[in-house]
Each structure stands twice: as structure tokens, then as C-alpha cells.
Image (cartoon, rainbow, N blue to C red):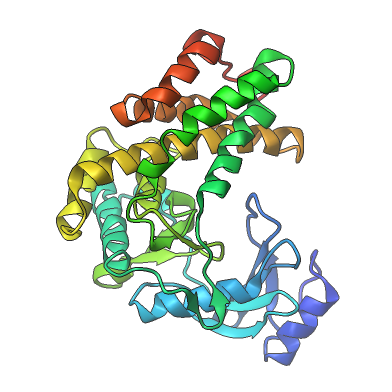
Amino acid sequence: MATIDIAEPAMRFLAVNGWGAARVRPLAGDASFRRYFRVDDGDRKAVLMDAPSPHENAGAFAALDTYLAGKGISVPEIYAADTDAGYLLLEDLGDAMFVAAMANGADEAELYATATDVLAHLHRDPMVIQCDQHPINSYAIARMRAEVGLLLDWHWPEIKGKLASDDERAGYEAAWDAVWSIATRYDDRLVQLDYHSPNLMWLAEREGLRRVGVLDFQDAMRGPAAYDLVSLLQDPRRDVRAGLEPQLVNRYLAQRSEFDREVFLASYAVMGAQRAARILGVFIRLWRRDGKTAYLKHIPRVWRLLDENLANPALAPVAAWFRRHLPTDQRRDFSDII
């Protein structure tokens, strides 16, 4: 086995499960505490997930992987697991992430349409309260409120040079409180939270919905059906082709005809604005706290996504707060840091 930055317990896990002679290479990390390694043993290939507790929950990944597989979704098969230690040996779904697949000629509309169909299929039924003994918690208003607060906690000081005052924070919270009831319609569906291009694979050799491989779902909750569709179509890391978003929202609604169209679109806008506000805080936190500057280049796109959602009349109180406190001419693109 190659000598790399992998803990001795992980090496023992591989050996116990018959992969002791495998070559192990690191895969790119993400914004979490998880680490991934590609494991090659002749014709056998796998991915080792190192998801240490208490920051990560390998058991949640295993339970949700089983749930999604039972719904006919392409998720990595689990070859071996020690969830207490945080190790999973997973099927290697390859390298064709959506962006890479499109760079190699795959049709963007086909990829995103199929990913939309996956969500419409999963949202046919309410999410179970638990799957394989793993509780599925509610994506509750208290969490939504805390997440939009990240904009004031991290982004606001970079623009204003000081913390938000109690009055400014109270006004911000009151504006959001006026729209949460709109967001939480159809709020008993699966919310994967990170259903977007970096976590989706294009498996062209498979058929139907199984052409989309889904990777990152261990934090899934029960919440608004609109959330994951927003996550897919309002990607903070890339611009979805012009005109594609409304087409795919219509495609989704055509399959979920039990949803009232206008109610769903209002929820979609609120969740889009909530998600953008959260990400504006998270991307600054990743820079200031964790030293990760790569996310700063996406901030202008996230501001644009926020403004597009704030244009929906359902968000009038929040839009008014931003016009007063963070208008366009007060924002920063952080290009001097990148």
C-alpha cells in the first residue's frame, strides 16, 4: 500500500475487509471534515470515506444510501462499513461529475433535466420519519433563521467594518420571520441540502434516473420540496444556462401536479433567498476561519441569485431590508483577495 496521509486505523479497516494490498490515493476534499481516498486493487476499485465523529456521521450516510438505493437512485454501493470509526468503503462512481461531463460534450439540458426528474421522483411521497434507525430531522424554521444569520455574523462585518447592531439584527430577523410560513409549504419531503453539480455524477452507461449518481446526502432532512430544486438550479459555483431554470421548474411541477404552482413558486423563491443569504455567510467563514479563499470568486454570483429571488413579491419584507441596509453599491466582490 502506498504511503500517504491516511490514519493507521483506516489502513487496518481496509486490510480487514480484503483491501490490504490496495493502492490508496487521496481524492479532492470538500468544505467538510470528510476525506476521500481512491482505492485500487487490480481490477477492483473503490472509494474510502473517512468521516470522523463528532463532526461527521458515517452511520447517517449508510442509512440514507440504503434509503435512496431502495428508491432506485444511483448512490454508491457500500462494500464495507465501520460506522463507529467513521469508515465506509464505497463503489467508485468514476470522475464524470456534471461539470466534467459537460466539458467532455454531455448536454447540459439533459443532465439537469434528469437530475430534476430524480427530485420529482423522490418527492412523490413524504419523507419517512427515520430510515434504517437513523432519525430524519425537520429542516425547521429555527434552523433557517440561524442560517440566514450567518450573513450578519460573517459577511456584514467585511462590508461594514463592524458588527451589526441589535436594531439592525432585529430588523433582519423580523423581515425573514414574515416569510417563513411561505417557505415551509410542502415541507415533508427529502431535503438533501447539497444537491448540486459538485455532488452529482453523470453515469451515461446507465438508464433513466440511474444516469444521475448522487454523492452527498448524509445531512438530509425533511423539509420544503423546493429546497433541493433551488440547490440544483441556482448553483453558487456555476451559471446554469440561461432559460433552463424556468423550463426545469415547469418540468418538475408537471410531475408533481399535487403541488399548487403559485404556492410552490413562492416557496422556491424564499428558499432560494434563504440559501443565498446563508452561502454569503458560509463563503466568508470558509475564508476567515478556515483559510479557504477559493469560494470567494463565487460571491458575485450568489448576490445575483439573492437579488433574483428577492424580486418575487412574496419576499417584499426581506427585499426592503436589503435595499435599506445592503444595497448593490455597498457590496464587495472580494476580487482583491482571490
State which quarter of the image contains the C terminus: top right
Location of residue 195 by image quarter? bottom left
Question: Relative to residue 227, is residue 201 depicted above or below?
Answer: below
Q: Residue at x 38, y 81 (%)?
A: 70
| Left or right: where 66 falls relative to 249 | right
Q: Residue at x 77, y 38 (%)?
A: 289
Outermost residue toward the top in this view: 329
| Left or right: where 42 falls relative to 161 | left
Location of residue 36 by image quarter? bottom right
Question: Relative to residue 39, is residue 29 depicted above or below?
Answer: above
Q: Residue at x 33, y 42 (%)?
A: 268
Residue 114 percent location from the top left of the image: 27, 59
Number of marks in picture: 0
Question: Can residue 96 be seen?
Answer: no
| Left or right: where 217 falls relative to 315 | right
Location of residue 49 by image quarter? bottom right
Q: Residue at x 50, y 12 (%)?
A: 324
Residue 82 percent location from the top left of the image: 69, 83
Question: Can residue 136 be seen?
Answer: yes
Question: Relative to residue 276, is residue 81 depicted above or below?
Answer: below
State which quarter of the image contains the N terminus: bottom right
Closer-to-camera residue (282/189)? 189
Closer-to-camera residue (279/166)? 166
Residue 57 percent location from the top left of the image: 66, 69
